[in-house]
Image (cartoon, rainbow, N blue to C red):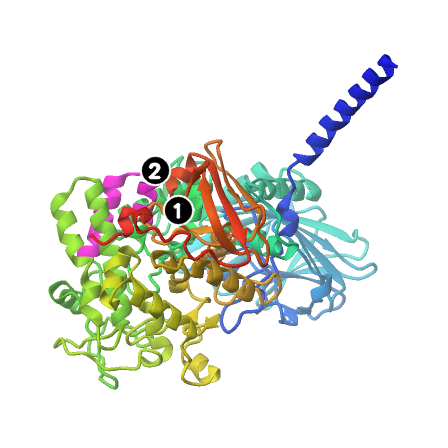
Amino acid sequence: MRKLLKSNCILFIIMLLFSCKENTKQVDNLKYVDPQIGGIAPLLQPTRTRMHIPNSMVRMYPARKDYRDDQICSFPLTVRSHRSDAIFNFLPVSGNFPENQVPVSAWDQDLEIASPYYYSTWLEDFDITVEYSPGEKTGFYRFNFPENTTRKLFLKALSGINWKMNDDGSITGTESFDGMNAFAFGVFDAPGVFSKSGENTWITWNQSSRNKIHFKYGISYISVEQAKKNLENEIPDFDFEKVKSAARAKWSKVINQIQVEGGTDAYKRTFYTALYRCLERMINISEDGQYYSNYDGQIHMDNRHFYVDDWIWDTHLALHPLRFILNPEIESDMISSYIRMYQQSGWLPQFPQLEGDTPPMNGFHSTIMILDAWRKGIRNFDINMAYEAMKKNALQGTMVPWKMGAACELDTFFYKNGYFPALHPGERETVKRVDAFEKRQAVAVTLAASYDDWALAQMAKELGKSDDYKFFSQRAKNFENLYWKEKGFFMPKDKNGKWIDIDPKFDGGMGGRDYYDENNGWTYLWSVQHNIPELQNLMGGKAAFELRLDQLFRENLGRSTYELYARFPDFTGIVGQYSMGNEPSFHIPYLYNLTNSPWKTQKKIRMLLNTWFKDNIFGIPGDEDGGGMSAFVVFSSMGFYPITPGIPVYTIGSPLFSKVTINIPNGKKFVVSAPNCSAQNKYIQSARFNGRVLNAPWFTHDDLINGGTLELIMGAYPNKQWGTDPMAIPDVFKPQ
């Protein structure tokens, strides 16, 4: 009997050990990623069904308008930028298609398979299934042709493109755009015949060829020889499944850096797809210790990776801060790339693209991004050169929207008077530098410059430059010059210092660009992240500030939605006068954490996530902008948000999951534990951080990266007292 008991005990222990092992097995959350989410935009730009390795040079997107488009025009070898600009386009064709025509094909949405690492679609007009899997500087297509028919590949003729077939059957391509060249080298696993018909180029395989034809290729911005070398390094054979498996492994690693428990599958699909979107840009264009930079037209020998393709107006708010947590090493290379661009071109870029800086929108927000990185411990870049660049932009660069270069008379006026001058309705523009469509955006420019100047002042303080600190701290208060107290909005002034009395809801022409930018005065009322206490003072104090926030979410449009969208097509995801679909709004619902009602942040964040970020084809309420909006979703779903980039503090919202674990690169873990969190239980009843009572909705970046656990007890109704302790507000958010 004793032996039997001992045997059963051993068996029980073994079973328990196996059970524990099974329970601790990490779930591969890559299965939740759906690149089709958001594939139809509310008004402007949809998300793209994009296949690529995280932050890699080659990105593939089938050429079509959006998910509703019935036809695919072509497939690219890669795209130049996040939005599109496909290069080296082609389309497989079967049958007796006339070679003097340009082919397109219908496709079937229900037969398309899309994941970050693998793509497949059926071309209806040619009965061809196209498969694809990406490398970093390479890609691999597999064409599944029908039997007993001619098999062809159409190489699209575009301006500046040249295709050539080599004696060994490989092909090379050169495509020119915006003053630079891209190079391609490709190999097929079956010999084809190269021919031209007018401007059209074709590769043909006879009917006796096998039905599956593989095509692998390399891309370079240096030379054809380098493209070939990239291909040989990454894809030495014709094993499609091997490339697919390697791509999947790379995605699995980064997606599973964050593990969530609880929540619905729909929440997980939205969350992990948003995380995938955050891993597209910036892209690394370094090739074997060298890179071509169109910022000076030179090839540079440099073992440090060089990154391009960023829209800092969109990405400084949440995408860069997210990467400061998940991959600070890559982020330091990205910032170093900004600095090298400054050294090569003379200006710190705003929208650094492959072909050079394109300065859309307004503001020098790369200054904010660099300060935020520095204060979060990212130091592996030349801070003195960075400061030189930031200061040059601030003192010598023009603030005219969508322009880059030396200051003009409007900037001189700003330096002297502390605001960007606006024109009266109907007044003719006299400054040639101002874009005819983008206009002056006078209020938005002034507010953006105030935040940028604050960041520059703080950076000066970090570096012990006291005179610069005082000078730029004073300029950081310029937002006060445009607050019209009687109106309760930031409003425009003319060159004589007189107010221009407009309707801040609707005036300013297309997108409000005469005075604001893409959004109206209600959005820009809150664009003072760097000095929220003073913004509260301007509004009459904390209580008045809270009432104004309430009004924002309740204020009527004052006109039909049709009329509003005709003028403000970017103003989407509307709740009252709040626009979830545009980046300047991201921090606004978190501002309740600086009032006596932090519970309202919890309420609003849950409502906004549940309303506007569904796990379906309509699941993005505005232009996603290559991770800009998706990073808001990632942060907010985890339960916290960086309300002011440049201040290394996070404010707490309402998590979607009962447990979130971030595996930090330093080997530590940060956990948000909310065990009774649910669709109804969205309100925080009490909180602890690493076991100590937490009476305020805040924690620091050091708290996060040093590892720890934020414990949230959730309930169905708000605890209106939690988080209201005025002494617990971080000093940086207290009146100075």
- The answer to whether residue 222 is left or right of residue 420 is right
- Residue at screen point 13% across, 50% down: 470
Q: Can residue 216 be seen in this view?
A: no
Question: Which residue type carries mark 1?
Answer: Asn
Quick one: label 1 or label 2, which is nearer the N terminus?
2
Direction from residue 654 to residue 32 in the image, left or right: right
- The one nearer the camera, 483 or 722, is 722
Using a 10 Å C-alpha cutoff, classify the residue at mark 2 as few (fewer than 14 neighbours), some (14 to 19) or many (20 or more): some
- 296 to 49, vertically: above or below: above
Disc 1/disc 2 C-alpha distance (Å): 26 Å
Left or right of 726 on screen, residue 396: left
Instruction: Assess whether residue 185 is covered by the magenta stretch.
Output: no
Dots 1, 2 in contact, CB < 8 A: no
Residue 468 x/y as whole percent: 14, 48
Q: Residue 462: x, y in percent?
A: 22, 41
The mark tally for this picture is: 2
| Residue position for label 2 | 377
391 in the magenta segment:
yes
Quadrant for the N terminus, please.
Answer: top right
Q: Could you tell me residue 444's position as x and y percent?
A: 29, 68
In front: 189, or 365?
365
**Residue 152 placed where, x, y %?**
70, 60
Secondary structure that dominates the magenta span: helix
Q: What secondary structure is found at the residue carrying circle 2? A: loop
Start and end of the magenta stretch? 369-396
Circle on res. 695: 1
Q: Which amino acid does label 2 sit on?
A: Gly
Q: Is residue 586 above or below residue 308?
A: below
Q: Can residue 22 be seen in this view?
A: yes
